Amino acid sequence: MSFEEIYIGHYSKVFRLCMGYVNDADWAKDLAQETFINVWQKLHQFRNESAIGTWIFRIASNVCLRQLERHKKMPRSEMPVQLEDIKEPDMENNIRLLYRFISELAETDRVIISLELEDLKQAEIASIVGFSETNVRVRVHRIKEKLSQKFKDHEQSDRF
Amino acid sequence: MNSQIDFKSLYQSQETGPVPDVKEVVKKAAVLKRKMLFKLLSVNGLLAGTAALIVLILTHHPAQDLTTKFGSILIIMAIVSYLTVSNRAISLLFRVIPDLDNHAFLNLLISIQRKQQFLHKTMLRVYFILLSTGIFLAMIESAIKMGLMNCMLIYSGVILWIALNWLVVMPKSVKKQEKEFDTILGNLHRINAQLDHN
């Protein structure tokens, strides 16, 4: 498989993971690009011990987790999210809300839920994060509860 | 509405925009590699050049006094120790494998940061001690030949320069780096703890 094929086949998935992590499209693009720069540099070291997708997600999640080391993050309150001002169709609004809520979770929870929602098997998620499968299952359940609660709270605050 | 939210389909409906040109990624990766190499070569080249120049001068104009020879050796030792440490720090960064699992990757970053923190703190002091003592000793021979007034003038300058480094430049640099290291390590520990507690 050539780098170009890998890049085209995985760009959207990597972008979504980064977007869930930072909730900022430009920043997510930069992170996705940094991920593929690493993939390009390390591709010759890839030994087929895991699926290429799992390998790329490991790199992408590590690139995301490393952001705190490199950047002073913009506090969430200063993020240019104007959800309250823009009236959009429900679907669009819910997508925006979901990504915002994911980015408000603890760093590793953002990675876990993004991988889960990307349809990765929990065994794969476990091998990316460095957890046991049982831990991933428990964590995914908790995160989904948190997200549901956030949607519920948002709905309630919207009514008033 | 909550119970009906399909997180998976919402998540996957996120617009990702057009896929940036793959050539751009490859180009950026190559530029990055070149920049790193250039940085490595320029620091090494500049300092190795300085050391070579000192050796060359000493070979062509052999020093009479032991203090000059000893001072020059100390200056070269300062340069060599700086190069060794900075190259080691860069090679530590190069060895970071981003395809480890998150837990292992965070642990590796923490251990690298600790090593770099130690190297920076310790070696900066060693570098300044060797360099200052080296310059102080190497100048004795020529300063004596200049007469008392010039000698006093030159040594006042040297002592002032050394004092400036010890009292202003070095503490400032150490403090700045320490703060940076502490922030980085604090964040890495905090994220890693999320993987420890289940």
Image (spheres, coloured by chain):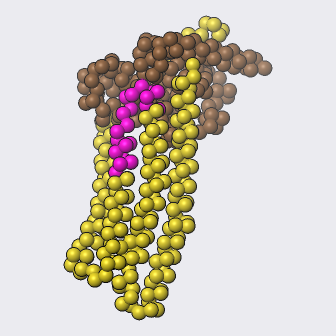
Chain colours: A brown, B yellow
Q: Quadrant of residue B175?
A: bottom right
Question: Where residue A5 sits: x, y (%)?
Answer: 29, 24
Residue placed most toward the observer, B88 or B98: B88
Residue at 52%, 46% (x, y): give it: B181
Q: Residue at x 34, y 54 (%)?
A: B84
Q: Nearer the viewer, residue A19 or A84?
A: A19
Part of the protein shown in magenta: B86-106
Tell me the quarter of the image containing the C terminus of chain B. top right
In the picture as drawn, the residue positioned furthest to the front comes out as B66
Q: Which residue lies most toward the top here?
A: B4
Query: How far across and how far down the image is residue A23, in percent?
Result: 55, 29
Residue at 21%, 75% (x, y): give it: B59
B181 vs B73, nearest the viewer: B73
Task: Please state the horizontal and vertical placement of residue A43, each as a whole percent of the image.
Answer: 28, 30
Side (left or right) of B98 relative to B60 = right
Instruction: Indicate the quadrant where residue B95 lies.
Output: top left
Is residue B24 something one can see in this rendering? no
| Residue B166, x across and y down, in percent | 52, 67
Magenta span contains residue B93: yes
- Above or below, B5 against B195 in this view is above
Q: Would you say A63 lies left or right of A98 here? A: left
